[in-house]
Amino acid sequence: MKKAFALLLCTVLISGILAGCGSTEKKEADNTAEGKTWIVATDTVFKPFEYTNEKNEFVGIDVDIIAAIAEDQGFKYELQSLGWDAAVAAVQAGQADGIIAGATIKQDRIDSGWIFSEGYYNATQTFVVAEGSDIASFDDLKGKNVAVKNATAGADYANSLKDQYGFTVTVFEDSPTMYQDVVLGNSVACVEDTPIMAASIKENGLALMIPAGMESEGAPYGFAIMDKADQELLDMFNAGLANIKKNGIYDEIIAKYLK
């Protein structure tokens, strides 16, 4: 009898332990799912959308928008400032889940696997010249060189005009180096998103100016993923964007950087 009771007690204890283990494993799995941290890649310097301020804080329109949307939707994320080319490569390689870096929604990007959110900001691209330059129209660019940033809407805009107006193009990997090439006189102009250029000239005292009538029609910026498995993140971005536009937070962010 004692042996039978002991055997029964042992069986109950083992069952309880196994059930407890199963419960713990499930809870840990649930916590892992609930606690997912999305990796979002961005540029290093694309003022006023992402840049480091005088307090060595990484700030900007894109930085604030993703923060506001994450708070609205209740998800965790890690923003990695990698530079444009490295940010794109990280998402393509699956090392990051999404990218927010003033990325223009373009058909060639969609064709190559970018999956965009709704547009969150409409921007034009403009030619920019050195202070005191006599470049005032596209015709003045004939026989001269124009600096562009790799794989951007600005580069596309310049390339769409170079044959018509007879100028050449030099490609750079980041905006500050591109600006410097114009300041030094190696290129007579560069092409940049208009709000970025205006902010950079004003806040950094760059010896550059924006001539009238040399801008594009404009196109929207979008957040993007490149793997359909990350659709949840894109859906949350779109939902959060709609909410912060409705409650006024979006307008506050834009006004903060583009007064």
Image: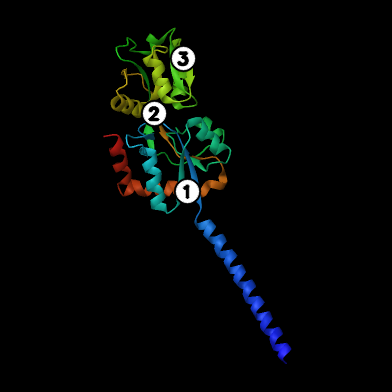
Q: Is residue 30 above or below residue 61?
A: below
Which three-letter amino acid code belongs to the residue tagged 3?
Lys
Residue assigned mark 1: 235
Can you name the residue that lies furthest to the top here?
143
Q: Earlier in the sequence, mark 3 or mark 2?
A: 3
Q: For mark 3, does the 10 Å Cα neighbourhood hold few (<14), some (14 to 19), or many (20 or more) residues?
A: some
Relative to the observer, which residue lies in front, 186 or 239? 186
Q: For mark 2, does the 10 Å Cα neighbourhood hold few (<14), some (14 to 19), or many (20 or more) residues?
A: some
Compared across the picture, whether 22 is left or right of 166 comes to right
The residues tagged by marks 1 and 3 sit, at their Cα atoms, a distance apart of 39 Å
The residues tagged by marks 3 and 2 sit, at their Cα atoms, a distance apart of 18 Å
Q: How many marks?
A: 3
- Residue at image point 44% right, 12% down: 145
Residue assigned mark 2: 218
| Colour basis | rainbow
x and y, in percent, of residue 23 in the image? 58, 69
Relative to the observer, which residue lies in front, 70 or 223? 70
x and y, in percent, of residue 40 in the image? 48, 42
Which three-letter amino acid code belongs to the residue tagged 2?
Gly
Local SS, label 3: helix
Q: Is residue 36 above or below residue 223?
A: below
Can you name the residue that lies furthest to the left here?
259
Residue assigned mark 3: 162
Quadrant assignment for the C terminus: top left
Q: Is residue 49 visible?
A: no
Which three-letter amino acid code belongs to the residue tagged 1?
Asp
x and y, in percent, of residue 143 in the image? 44, 7
Compared across the picture, whether 230 is left or right of 161 comes to right
x and y, in percent, of residue 42 in the image? 46, 37
